Image (cartoon, rainbow, N blue to C red):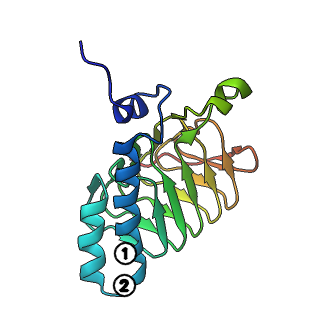
């Protein structure tokens, strides 16, 4: 049996060494790509860069620069995803965003986390937990989506919310920590 690579550990939610050469190289590649994306106004060039950067990019995706990622390759976007200015996605684990999702300016999506035990955290290994944002979600500006969270379909997340736990479908959630403040009618 072969030992897992640090990337495999990262994607499976195990402690991993973020300074492993393969991960450092992947982050450098992503940084080079998103810097090019952020520097150009040419929409065809931006599209080509995003196709190279992201794990999947559905049809009709629109991302306004600046846009920042850790790896990019762990981000999977459905169709008709819109991201406004200044979005940051730390995609140490998979970040899956469904169809028809609207993401406001300066939204932060963090799959990266660290051990809570100080001794282990100081030793340096990191953790990551996947994030899923289901279809037809709207995330208001300045919201923060924390590691391991799923946001259910047809849900609205209020501006400035800090989403620390799963949010069910068909609701409005807001606050810090985000909680359900309204149940919405179900969309077929």
Query: Residue 85 got which mark?
Result: none
Q: Which residue is drawn at 27% across and 73% down?
A: 47
Residue ranking furthest to the bottom: 41
Question: Which residue is painted at 38% across and 32% down in the image?
Answer: 6
**Number of numbered discs on residues:** 2
Indicate left or right for 120 with 31 as reference. right
Residue 132, relative to residue 99: is it above or below?
above
Q: Regarding mark 2 in the picture, which secondary structure is present there? A: loop
Q: Residues within 10 Å of mark 2 (few under 14, many from 20)?
A: few
Q: Can residue 169 be seen from the camera position used here?
A: yes
Quarter-of-image position of residue 104: bottom right
Location of residue 136 in the rendering, given as x and y in whole percent from the top left corner: 43, 54
Outermost residue toward the right in this view: 176
Disc 2 and disc 1: Cα gap in Å?
Answer: 6 Å
Q: Do the residues labelled 2 and 1 touch (CB within 8 Å)?
A: yes
> Which residue is painted at 30% across and 87% down in the image?
42
For this view, does 58 lie left or right of residue 183?
A: left
Vertical placement of residue 158 versus 183, above or below:
below
Q: Is residue 2 left or right of residue 88?
A: left
- Where does the N terminus fall, quadrant-wise? top left
The residue pinned by badge 2 equals: 40
Q: Which of 95 and 121 is in front in this view?
A: 121
The x, y position of residue 65, in whole percent, is 46, 76
Coordinates of residue 165 in the picture (x, y in percent): 63, 36
The residue wearing badge 1 is 37
Residue at screen point 59% across, 34% down: 124
**Residue 41 screen position, x and y as percent:** 36, 87
State the image quarter where residue 132 is shown.
top left
Q: Taking 75 as reference, is 113 left or right? A: right
Callout 1: SS = helix
């Amino acid at each position: 049996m072969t030992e897992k690579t640090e990337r495999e550990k990262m994607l499976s939610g195990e402690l991993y060494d973020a300074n492993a050469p393969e991960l450092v190289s992947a982050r450098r590649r992503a940084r080079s790509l998103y810097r090019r994306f952020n520097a150009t106004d040419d929409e065809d060039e931006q599209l080509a860069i995003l196709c190279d950067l992201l794990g999947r990019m559905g049809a009709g995706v629109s991302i306004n620069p600046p846009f920042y990622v850790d790896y990019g390759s762990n981000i999977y976007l459905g169709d008709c995803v819109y991201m406004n200015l200044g979005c940051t996605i730390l995609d140490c684990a998979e970040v899956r965003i469904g169809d028809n999702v609207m993401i406001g300016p300066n939204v932060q999506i963090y799959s990266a986390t660290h051990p809570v035990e100080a001794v282990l955290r100081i030793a340096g290994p990191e953790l990551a937990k996947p994030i899923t944002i289901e279809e037809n979600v709207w995330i208001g500006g300045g919201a923060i989506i924390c590691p391991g969270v799923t946001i259910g379909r047809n849900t609205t997340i209020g501006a400035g919310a800090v989403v620390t736990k799963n949010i069910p479908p068909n609701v409005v959630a807001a606050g810090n920590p985000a909680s359900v403040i309204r149940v919405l009618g179900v969309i077929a």
